[in-house]
Structure formats: structure tokens, C-alpha cells
Image (tube, helix red, strand yellow):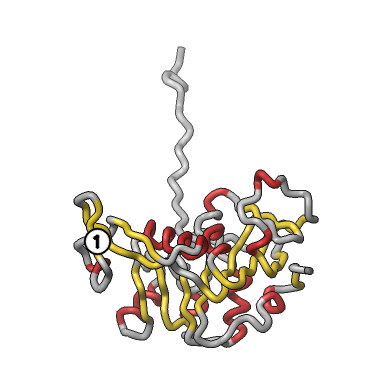
Amino acid sequence: MDKVYSDARSALAGLVKDGMTIMAGGFGLCGIPEALIEAIRDSGAKDLTFISNNAGVDGVGLGRLLETRQIRKMISSYVGENKLFAQQYLSGELELEFNPQGTLAERIRAGGAGIPAFYTKTGVGTLIAEGKEVREFNGEKYVMETGLFADISIVHAWKGDTEGNLVYRKTARNFNPMMATASRMTVAEVEHLVPAGEIDPDCMHTPGIFVKRMVHVPNPVKHIEQRTTRKRAEAAVPAGAGEEV
């Protein structure tokens, strides 16, 4: 089975439809499958539900799909850096299912592991628990959360081989490995595509059995979400310098 496609649009051909649920890896702008997001925008599909930690920033990542009003609902844990996300939610144009970040990660992991629901203390006694089952274990209350499973997962990897085995790099790993397991179809974009057998099996983060389609995206633009710099320090002058002897 040839998993490698020539470009992001062909990798998603026949998959993206109105009203479907899509998981998108990444955290802020780190590790986002930007080429695949652009291909979804170009598909014109609408009324989409996205499961993603956040929606990128204005004009980048999932922010592009907010601009075109293709997203109907977000299942996320953070809004902060995207003004359009906040505006659409507050105006009632965009539905939002908020999750504590750890709960979101565990809901995705559970979905990939075939676990329909689990109990957690996070959110007990808050708005998070409204309408959900709360049970007591060993004298402590826990709220039930359901696992998440999508029609498609789109992920970004640093390296992949032609069999779909993936390696993520540092913090760009984030939600990508969990999401790769939690859908009917995982499509991966990879920065470095290598022949099968070149990745040490002990170093694989996502086994190729989870990945059905791939696209090679070399040298992607890596956006900086918040650039923080400090003023350059002035050169220190040694004590006594310039004094007459």
C-alpha cells in the first residue's frame, strides 16, 4: 500500500466532507499540520467540528478556517491568542466545548485506546461538571468524561518513513501521537521522508499501522507565536580602564 501522496490536497482527496469531526495536532503554532489545514480550507468543507488544543492564532493554522467560517464547533482547552476565535464564540457563531487541558489529552488518549469514558477529579464542583455524571470513589467525588474519536486526524511529524512510522521532535510532539490513534483515518505531513527501515523501531513515536496517508512537506514555515527578546547588554568596562597611571 503506497501511503505517500504528492501534495496535501491529494492526501485528503475524498476524505473531507461537510459536518465531519477532525482532530488537528499541535499546541499553539508548534507542531501544527499547516499544509493539511490549508488543504481543508481549499476543500470548502463546512460545519466542521475540530478537536484541537486551541485554534492557532489569527490568520495562521486553524485560524485560517475560522476566517472562512468553515468551523462550526471547537473542542479545545484554550482560546487566548486568537481574537477571532473569541469573537465568534462570544457572538454565538461558534460552538465551544471547553476542557481542562489534561482532561482533553486524556479524552483523546482514551478514544484511541477504545475506552468510552473515565472518571477524574478535575472539574468537580465547577461548570465543567454540569450535566455530567459524578460518582464517589473512596470518599472522593469524580466526574465522568467521555473518550474522543474523530473521522480524521491530521498530524505533523518531524520524520516519517514510507510505511507511515512517525517521529516527532521535542515539544512539537504535544497532542500529535495521541490524535494519530484516535480516528478512523490519520493523515500525516512529515518534514523528512525516509525509506522504510531507516527509523530505529525503538525511536518510533507513532507506528505506521495508525497512518493511512502521508505527504512530504520539507522546510515548512515555523511561526513564532510570541517573540520574547531582551535588550542587548552593554559591554562591561573593566575597573580602572581609561585612568592614567
Q: Amino acid at mark 1?
A: Arg
Q: Quadrant location of residue 194?
A: bottom right
Helix, strand or loop status at disc 1: strand
Image-based side of 192 in relation to 131, left or right: right
- Against 226, residue 184 (above or below) is below
Image-based side of 24 in relation to 105, left or right: right
The residue drawn where x is 53% and y is 66% is: 182
- Viewport quadrant of the N terminus: bottom right
Residue 60 visible, this orientation: no
Residue 133 visible, this orientation: yes
Image-based side of 47 in relation to 204, left or right: left
The residue drawn where x is 66% and y is 83% is: 14
Q: Residue 219 location, x and y as percent?
A: 69, 60
The residue drawn where x is 68% and y is 59% is: 208
Q: Residue 167 location, x and y as percent?
A: 64, 53
Mark 1 residue crowding within 10 angstroms, few (<14) / some (14–19) / many (20+): some
Instruction: Identify the residue under disc 1.
Output: 135
Front residue (pair 61, 238): 61
Q: Residue 200 location, x and y as percent?
A: 71, 45
The residue drawn where x is 55% and y is 60% is: 176
